[in-house]
Image: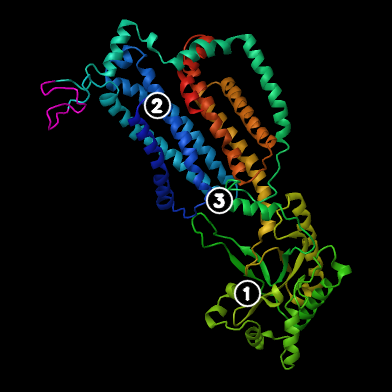
Amino acid sequence: MSITGSVFLALVGMSEILLSIPVAWFFVRVILQIKYFAGINLMCIFIVCAIGADDIFVFMDAYVQSQYKGANVVRDMETRFSWVYRKSGLAMAITSATTCAAFLTCFTTPLPDTQAFGVFAAVVIAADYIFVMTMFCTAVMVYHNRFEKPPACGFNVPTPFGSCFCGCCTESCNCSLSDPSPTQKALTASSNGSSEMESDKIELFFRTKFAPMILNVKARVVIAVVAIAWLIPAIVFVFKLTPTTKPEQFLNENHPFQKAINVLNNNFGANSQDAGIDIFYVWGLQDVDRSGVNVLLNTSHLGKPVYDDKFKLSAACQDKIAQICDDFKTKNKTEEYLNMVQRNKEGQGSVKCFTYPLKEYQARNPGADRNAPKTWMTEFFKENVPEVDDEETSKIVPVSQRFNTAGGARIGWDGTNLKFVGISIEAKAVTQWDRPPEDFMMKQYKMYDDLRANLDFIAADACGSKVLMTDRFDGIADGGSKFVFMNNQRVYRTSAIRGALIGVAIAFGVLLACTWSPVQAVFATLSILCTMISVIGFTTMVGWDLGSIEAILISILAGFSVDYVVHLAHAFSHSYGTAHERTVAAFSEMGSPVLSGM
């Protein structure tokens, strides 16, 4: 309101900003058919408030400046608004396009949350631009005609009581809404040569104080020294930015839920009694077939399990897997891999193997053909998992989740065929509450993957299938929590760097197109790089890690930074005169909206 000077314009401006959210969601959901809604999409509320306000400031500043641009601009309302529309519309179109492009760089990451946020935010910004150029522009015209210069009596609207709306006119008054109109007044002032004295104070500050200071050689030297003194440590801290090593905190640290989560995650150190994560080794499964998977368009299709047709749970395969389970239980052979704390009365806390209940069943049923499990698996299944109906047994994933012998082993039986079998061991160095750093988890992953290669050497020939390793098992071979978190840390880092570089390239292209000057585009891009270095360096200085939100913000940082730079560069390149005169004109013209936007 302090910028527009009108409650009416402030209300309309906030209304069009907030309307951008539901309109964008309608477009994303109905037109683009994107059904995935990421939690971080809620950040768009704050983003569109900032960018929408910036667009309003640019439009209003152009409207205010128009009254000082001479008779050719203010000769009538149509001419004046045409000038405002063209001037502000181009500036906002450039910045909105670069910001949308910056958000769309989120598609360079494979994470669906980040992709969904990028496209939703881009559409929100586009919707806000359309609303500013239509709804807010119309509101400014209404403001010009009705509210900017009301008559002495207010509105000339007779009431049943015989007085004007404002209550200060008599029944016989004939006051006019705009006599003269604000545009006519500006034309008269321009003809009298008095418009310069009525210029906006902020504009006068940038034209008479700030621009001369920038043009002063000594001042520029001081600015350069201060900038270099800051950028050197900032660059050092940029290279100290590391991926997050703990769960991301989305609530305020004083929120009761967040306090409880932080206590569980940070205040209880791991010890030998803590349960480690389960590492699964599965025979009969291959990598998930993710062809046609697009989580944004179809949230239910995450891929199909691929079964190895060569897998066969023969007697030889059963013996080899039993041998592996026995070897795991030998402490001196597996001490570096397993948490050896036993957690239940059967002694299966650290190793969970289906071969133990299977041996008991076969001992009770000596007639069962070990090489043909199809003939007895149904009975074995019923013994170990009672209350399994036909509908469930026909679905491989739910059954495999329910069949949990020895607290963690897996058997994939669909009621007719045996699809896969799996065992699990309890990890020694990674507990269920840990969020270890990427380098540590990579060493753990390599260690358990090397163990997988050893298991292949033992059982691959007998089982006809190679073993698959994962730290989470949901019925299909779809990696899990800790190893996925490790991979996400790498994705955060690479996507932030990739997105930032793409954003800088886009910014350079936009600046070159706006200025048609490679020199201006290069120096403006260097300004953007300095901004990015400052933000990333400061982020590290205050102790922040690189999580999903930080990675997104770094990716879009160039798109945001170019907004201010392109305003000034565009104004400078479209001004006339010497370099000094064009500098003064650029600061005079765009200093106020840039300050307001900041």
**Viewed as shown, does residue 140 lie left or right of 503?**
left
Location of mark 1 (residue): 400
Q: Position of residue 129 (x, y in %)?
A: 41, 35
Name the quadrant of the N terminus: top left
Q: Amino acid at mark 2?
A: Phe
Task: Give the label on residue 21, or none.
Answer: none
Q: Residue at x 37, y 31 (%)?
A: 10
* Magenta part of the chain: 157-173
Query: Which structural element holds mark 1?
Result: helix
Q: Residue at x 57, y 20 (%)?
A: 520
Task: Give the label on residue 59, or none.
Answer: 2
Q: Earlier in the sequence, mark 1 or mark 3?
A: 3
Location of mark 3 (residue): 113
Q: Earlier in the sequence, mark 3 or mark 2?
A: 2
Against 381, residue 512 (above or below) is: above
Q: Earlier in the sequence, mark 1 or mark 2?
A: 2
Does residue 315 appear anywhere in the picture?
yes
Which is nearer the eye, 256 or 356? 256
Q: Position of residue 199 (x, y in %)?
A: 40, 13
In whole angstroms, how far apart are the C-alphas of marks 1 and 2? 61 Å
Q: Amino acid at mark 1?
A: Ser
Which is nearer the eye, 78 or 276? 276
